Every structure is written in C-alpha cells, then in structure tokens.
C-alpha cells in the first residue's frame, strides 16, 4: 500500500525480508529519494556490523530514503540526524523517563535499548548523488528476548502508541533535522545529540574490532567521532565501535 505524508511516498508491506533491502532495490530501479518503506514484520532484519535484529510484529520497522547533495564523506553524519529524530519522538511520548542516545545511534530508555539504526548507501541510475537508506527499528509492542543487553518496548513503558502514529512523527522529525543538517551542517545536530548522550563525562569501555580501550568519554569531534581520554591523558579518536558503560 502506498500513501503520502508531506510529499513523502510511503510504501507499506505486511512482510519483507528487510526494509533496507527493499529500499535498495527501489533506489537501484530509479526511486532515489523522498521514499519511506515500512513493514509489519521483517524476516531477515539486521543491525550494525551484520548483527541480526529481531523485527517482531507490532513494532516499527522502516527505511527512509534521502538523496542529499553533499560530499559522500558526509553521508554517515545522517546517523546522528536519525538518532536525534528517534530520541525526540520517543521522549515526546514518555517525557517522565530518561531517553538517551548511546553512541553512535542506539536509543535507550532507562538504560534499556528500544531502537536501533542502520545506514546504507545505494545508487540510482542517472542520479548525480548516492541515496542514503536510513533503516530504523523501534520496539513498540514487543521487546526481543535472549539478548546480551536489556531491551524494552513502548507498551512495557505504559505507552500505547501505534506504529503508524510513531512513523508519521518520525518522518516529520527526521526531515526537519535533515533539512537543518543540509543547510547548517552537523554542529547543531551534534549539540542536541550530546544533550542526551549516554556516558558523557564518564568512564567507558570501547570495543573496536579486537581492540578494547578504556577511558573517559570526553566529547565528539566535528564529524561525530568519539573522543576517549585514557588514564595517560592521551585522547583517542574513535570512528566506529561499541561502547559499554561501567
């Protein structure tokens, strides 16, 4: 089923292997931007670094496709745009609870994960710029189990929002922030991101591949890399990895 929301074409499916994969196929067929794919259920969803993502019925699974006219090196910055958009949406629904962002883009409520984000790039035939597929999953009705970390869902937090209502607000928030990013750069996005950061100013562990680094999460640099100050005073700049709070 297709409908529109503020000029955005929304394609809704009962079941897909992956909304990102469907979005990629549509981009490669010529639909380069202003497109959202959503699905009630994904059978082959994945998160960062190829990890499996449990996409359960009743939860929100979507991919937003944009084609910003910026240098390719800047496209990864949309990860922070998406994280702030999701944080805004969830915080609006449960204002009394702590809704935080764990670097780079996991959303936690009271320390339990409720959302994950995966960015991928695809190229449309004839398009000057690559398209960015922003895959977003939010636990609305059910929290996955058998995980190595705590997870939660909106229903368990006494919030009865529907996936459709959440999707509508998410599209609005994302496009507003994406427009701000396109015109004003990453700085205002990072400022809001840091306002809700997990572990900022605290001692954390960062795992990057086989390396493990400990130190204080001091800040983000202008591109969103994590700045970690070790016990020796040296600051490491980390562009990718997983963080663990002591």
Image (cartoon, rainbow, N blue to C red):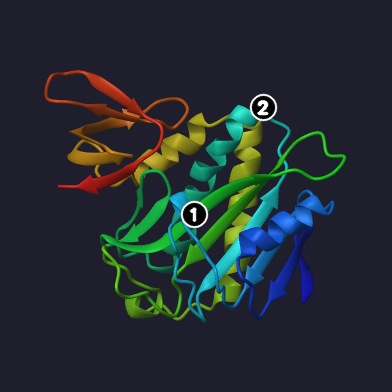
**Residue 102: percent from left, percent from top:** 34, 49
What is the number of the mark on residue 239?
none
Residue found at x 45% / y 36%: 190
Q: Which residue corresponds to mark 1?
A: 117
Residue 225 falls in image quadrant: top left
Q: Viewer-proximal residue, 90 or 215?
A: 215
Residue 232 falls in image quadrant: top left
Determine whether, in the image, residue 13 is placed left or right of residue 181: right
**Residue 132: percent from left, percent from top:** 66, 45
- Quadrant occupied by the N terminus: bottom right
Label 1's element?
Answer: strand
**Which residue is outermost to the left?**
231
Q: Viewer-proximal residue, 6 or 80?
A: 80
**Residue 36: percent from left, percent from top:** 69, 61
Residue found at x 57% / y 77%: 41
Q: Are marks 2 and 1 in contact (CB under 8 Å)?
A: no
Residue found at x 25% / y 21%: 235
Q: Which residue corresponds to mark 2?
A: 71
Determine whether, in the image, residue 218 is placed left or right of residue 127: left
Q: Is residue 86 above or below residue 94?
A: above
**Which residue is outermost to the right?**
126
**Residue 168: percent from left, percent from top:** 63, 66
- In whole angstroms, how far apart are the C-alphas of marks 2 and 1? 22 Å
Looking at marks 2 and 1 on the same chain, the residue that comes earlier in the sequence is marked by 2
Q: Is residue 171 above or below residue 246?
A: below
Badge 1, how many Cα within 10 Å: few under 14, some, many 20+? Answer: many
């Amino acid at each position: 089923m297709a409908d529109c929301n503020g000029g955005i074409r929304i394609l809704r499916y009962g079941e897909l292997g992956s909304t990102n994969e469907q979005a990629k196929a549509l981009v490669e067929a010529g639909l380069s931007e202003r497109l959202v794919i959503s699905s009630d259920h994904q059978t082959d969803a994945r998160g960062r670094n190829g990890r499996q993502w449990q996409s359960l019925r009743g939860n929100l699974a979507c991919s937003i496709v944009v084609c910003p006219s910026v240098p390719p090196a800047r496209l990864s910055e949309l990860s922070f745009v998406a994280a702030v958009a999701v944080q805004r949406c969830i915080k609006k629904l449960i204002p009394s609870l702590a809704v935080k962002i764990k670097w780079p883009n996991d959303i936690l409520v009271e320390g339990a994960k409720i959302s994950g984000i995966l960015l991928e790039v695809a190229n449309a035939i004839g398009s000057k710029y690559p398209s960015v597929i922003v895959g977003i999953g939010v636990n609305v009705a059910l929290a996955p189990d058998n995980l190595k970390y705590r997870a939660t869902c909106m229903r368990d937090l006494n919030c009865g929002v529907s996936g459709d209502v959440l999707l509508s607000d998410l599209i609005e928030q994302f496009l507003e922030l994406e427009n701000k990013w396109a015109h004003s750069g990453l700085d205002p996005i990072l400022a809001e991101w840091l306002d809700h950061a997990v572990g900022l100013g605290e001692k954390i562990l960062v795992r990057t591949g086989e390396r493990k680094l400990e130190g204080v999460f001091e800040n983000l640099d202008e591109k969103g890399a994590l700045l970690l100050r070790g016990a020796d005073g040296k600051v490491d700049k980390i562009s990718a990895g997983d963080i663990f709070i002591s």
